[in-house]
Image: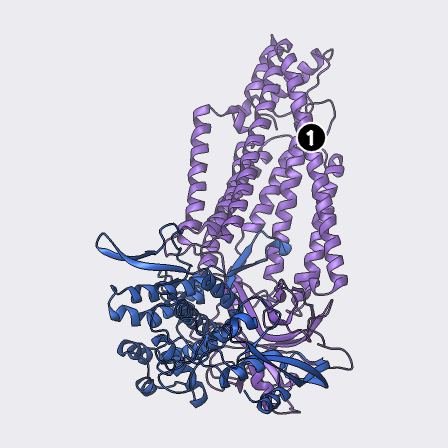
Chain colours: A blue, B purple
Amino acid sequence: MRDHDLRKKLVQFERSETVRSALREEVSQCGGDVVEWQRTRYLAKLSSVGSIRDEETCERLRGLIQRQVQICKRSVEVMDAVRRGAQLAIDECQFQFRSRRWNCSTLETMPVFGKVVTQGTREAAFVYAISAASVAFAVTRACSSGELEKCGCDHNVHGVSPEGFQWSGCSDNIAYGVAFSQSFVDVRERGKGQSSSRALMNLHNNEAGRKAILSNMRVECKCHGVSGSCEVKTCWKAMPPFRKVGNIIKEKFDGATEVEQRKVGSTKVLVPRNSQFKPHTDEDLVYLEPSPDFCDYDPRTPGMLGTVGRQCNRTSKAIDGCELMCCGRGFQTQEVEVVDRCSCKFHWCCYVKCKQCRKMMEIHTCR
Amino acid sequence: MTGAIIENMSTKKLVIVGVTLLLFQALAFMVGGLIAPSPTSAVEYLATKCVDTIKHRQETKWFMPWGPNQCDKIRTFDEAMAKRIEANNIVFAAHIPMPNNEMSPWFQFMLVILQFDIAFKMYNQIEEGAVVTVDVGLAYRDDSFSEWTEMAHSFEHRNLNCNFTADKTFENEGRYYECDPLPFMEVGSVAHKYYLINIRLPVNERKKVNIGIGEIKDIRLVGIHQNGGFTKVWFAMKTFLTPSILIIMIWYWRRITLMTRPPVLLEKVIFALGISMTFINIPVEWFSVGFNWTWMLLFGDIRQGIFYSMLLSFWIIFCGEHLMDQMERNRFSVYWKQVGPIVFGSFCLFIFDMCERGVQLTNPFYSIWASDVGTELAMSFIIVAGICACLYFLFLCFMVFQVFRNISGKRTSLPAMSKARRLHYEGLIFRFKFLMLVTLTCAAMTIIFFIISQVNEGHWHWGDHTVQMNSAFFTGIYGMWNLYVFAIMFLYAPSHKRYGDEQSSGQCIAGDGGATSGEDIQLTTTVTHVDGPTEIYKMTGKEAQE
């Protein structure tokens, strides 16, 4: 990273996050590959092109398997939400991994991540979980804003009466979002054949990602009986903010279980490799192989660019500390002038008036 | 009213009546649990962010979140920032209901809850005691192509009650505050098919309007309405119950008028209880399907209030009339001390309800809880009503205690009494204990089911064929109190046995009273003096003749 480049970046910056992302884009692009990721990334790229409106667009989307194209054609209106979900997953992944050696950055070329993590690593587990969750999340949101015509208020959800909504109201949108995620995201693994250990791992992690939403729904209630008493109370479930979902999946990532495939009876299941560990639950992430160290640039594996030039924290002993981040190669320290915002006036939306304060800051980057 | 049917009924008949009532009770629960859907449903709407580009418009324009003629949308406010759109040009739009659905008069009411998603930003935090000012409009239409008609428009203030659970550091920027849901709107009838809500959050730095409310990311609305299916089951139940109670009421009053003596207080109170029950039962709500009567919600509250206060008064008077001491009661004014709190408490709740739902008739966005003064006022009304309720229950418990004390006192002196007197007291004691038992059972059932339904709300049942516990609670409890009133009117009506003896028995008891004037116990209570066409009087008559 050249000093002057960095300064240019820093001048127009939005506090630390942008700096990180800028650094990320330019410097280190090591990545988790995952075919899933390619697809979602590809969908995400389309956000700049335009929305997915007609069935022909489905054909042109690269990264989808045949059965996904069929689903796409069948429910074109949902695909916009899927696209947004993919973008959401990338943003959240990059936020959660901002201070790790692998920072979830993506490449602009195909294949997006090369072959760095084709193996079933922890990182792959995270990416699968967050993608499945984000699709469910985005579809549910689209339902709530009335963009989709199916969803929870679909007339035959309850099956009790001919009148559906007027008789018994709607079912929760989240049920639709999760069901869509299940059919659309999981179909890849189901197509491959259930038996491969990779497919089992991916399916498990997809489900764990969706569980991260489902088991953290917030129940809110309103009393509206006589004089507003709790004689009549109506409760509903609100989705957690996606940042919270990301945090939960990140926690699961930190405590993920290494598993191996074993045959129990006629079915193949994943069991912890170390038999002394507690068996994983539905909500835990699982992986098959330990991750590489992501330290060094490897020309043979596209995307594995190493941590050279990454910013690090000198005082921290954790993974964002210079010791660990730079894999013991040491770091450079530069003093740069940072233009920060100060004494700002905010409106709730879209308006910020600030003074510019300059201050000197030390920035450490890995050798 | 000595000589109620209950005393003269054989055990066999009593059991038959009891079993029949229990069967109806089970039916009431099953109607709610198996036929009706859940009583209410909530639909979450994520408000669409529309951009109002034209500066000074003449007439109000309505912004549609989807469908034809939808507004210019933005997804996030970062987009707005890039396009230099100001806060004052953003309109949050929500269409009720979702696409492909229609609202219906069967929904009875519609209330909307407002929730803000506010992201934490180090430099743009929510200030202490932040107040949001919303400029809100509500419009309706009955087909999907005509123009929107304005229904209400208002500027409202709501206190933001948010807390941030994580540490307030740069690391946690972007996490959301946890904000309490805010009451937003309440409409007492759903006469139209489509509703549209447009919300603006105008900013005025000089007047400090909407300053320091954090970085709003989204507005979510939750629309709650009664389920059409539940309404239909409910109406059907009311329509069935009204004639049942009405008929037993007429029968009861005829019995009383057939007697030569004027009705005693307890009989009048039971009749009043029947009237208030019928008042609740009469399914005037049928009209709400055809007419746009927004006051139905308020009217329903009033009807329920009248019934509750009647029921509470009935218990007090029933206890009082069975006290079996020497006081001559039989006058309503005797009970002012006990009934006073009921009347005062109900009055407080009535005033509160008028302040909330009464004002909502003109401005559906009004909420008494929105302002600090209103909250204090509302709280004081509720607290006073609560104190009245406590006072009432103290009185009631004390009275019940007194009755039991007198009963045990009488028990010891019973064998020494003359047969007539003994039978009279035994009748009183049985009557009292029976009602006590039934009342306690009903009250316990109500409380148990209430708790179950409250707890049950927390858990969600997935799958299609679950028993609707909440609907079962409503229909079951409603049916139960109807049966209660029915049973009381039936069992505590004067018995018709031996009307012919009326005259003589009246004389007899007078004679009896005279003869035993030395005894310290007098037959006061409701009792009667006159009418007694019952076994007891038969006995007393005979004895006196002997």
Q: Is residue B161 above or below residue B195?
A: above
> What residue is shown with label 1?
B399
Rendered location of residue B184, percent (x, y): 62, 68
Measured along the vertical axis of the image, is residue B77 above or below residue B115? Answer: below
Q: Amino acid at mark 1?
A: Met
* Residue B141 shown left or right of residue B154 in the figure: left
Residue A81: quarter of image? bottom left
Give the residue displayed 63% in from the left and 45% down from the top: B308
Question: Front-most of A277 and A47?
Answer: A277
Q: Quadrant of residue A46?
A: bottom left
Q: Is residue B545 above or below residue B461?
A: above
Q: Nearer the viewer, residue A273 or B353?
A: A273
Whole-percent x and y of residue B183? 63, 65
Q: Quick one: which residue is furthest to the top in this view?
A: B546
10 Å crowding of disc 1: few (<14), some (14-19), many (20+): many
> Residue B446 at x, y = what percent?
54, 42
Q: Residue furthest front?
A: A329
